[in-house]
Image: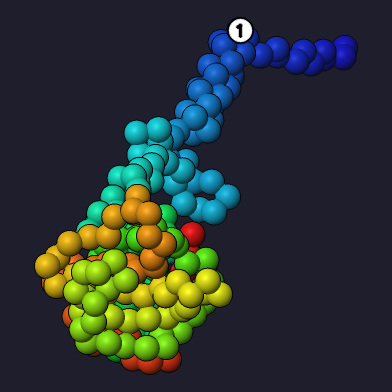
Amino acid sequence: MARSHSRSRPGPTVAVLTAVALAVVAFFAYQANAAPDRPGASGKPEPTPTEEIVPDKPDGDEQEDPDNPALPADSGEGVRVVYSLGEQRLWLVAEALDGLGEEVLHTYPAHRSTVDPQPGTYEVTRRDEAIPGSDGVPIQHVVVFHTDPEGIVFGFSAAVDGSLPDPSAQARTGGIRQSPEDSPHLWDFAEVGTQVVVVP
């Protein structure tokens, strides 16, 4: 008589345990993928939103010192006097002490007369320590840089009494006045042949 062999089927307990095990593995895999400090491709932890580095915001443009405004752009090169018609100001520019670049030695206001020189590059042609001004006022530290075809002389000076030219006067004059306190700076700086750059 032949003996029959029957195979035992896995019971419901094994199936439940297998499902639970798969669920646990899936849960931990999800946690590992969702972790904020999970290394990326570079091997470095990616920053969380609270750890993200935000660059500091600039404090804004630096405020320019009204007593020392910047040298105008396109105002030439080398040792020179720069005169701005728009700002009515002088800059005395020299080579930097280290021999690299240039530096402004002094800057201060200057005051126009009735006629302005044309923007351009000139050079000092004459110096007079003290003479009568074209408006009749005694002046000192006179540094002349141009005479136009009409005979109008353009130069820097200071009135001995500290007065300023009257730009509404009838006489056509080209004297550019400085204060008696400022004029020695230009007098000591601008020798004959020194470049004078007039900018708009």
Q: Residue at x 38, y 65 (%)?
A: 173
Res. 102 visible in picture? no
In the rendered image, the residue lying farthest to the top is 12
Quadrant in the rendering for residue 100: bottom left
Q: Position of residue 46 (x, y in %)?
A: 46, 43
Q: Residue at x 45, y 71 (%)?
A: 152
Quadrant in the rendering for residue 99: bottom left
Question: Considering the numbered disc 1 on the image, is that residue within a helix, a strand or a loop?
Answer: helix
Quadrant in the rendering for residue 139: bottom left
Res. 134 visible in picture? yes
- Asked if residue 88 is positioned above or below residue 58 in the image, the reply reads below
Q: Is residue 108 left or right of residue 74?
A: left
Q: Position of residue 146 (x, y in %)?
A: 46, 78
Q: Residue at x 42, y 88 (%)?
A: 125
Q: Position of residue 110 (x, y in %)?
A: 29, 64
Q: Position of residue 151 (x, y in %)?
A: 48, 75
The quadrant of the image that shows the N terminus is top right
Q: Nearer the viewer, residue 190 or 22?
A: 190
Mark 1 — residue?
A: 12
Q: Residue at x 38, y 46 (%)?
A: 55
Q: Residues within 10 Å of mark 1 (few under 14, many from 20)?
A: few
Tell me the kind of residue under disc 1.
Answer: Pro
Q: Is residue 22 left or right of residue 58?
A: right
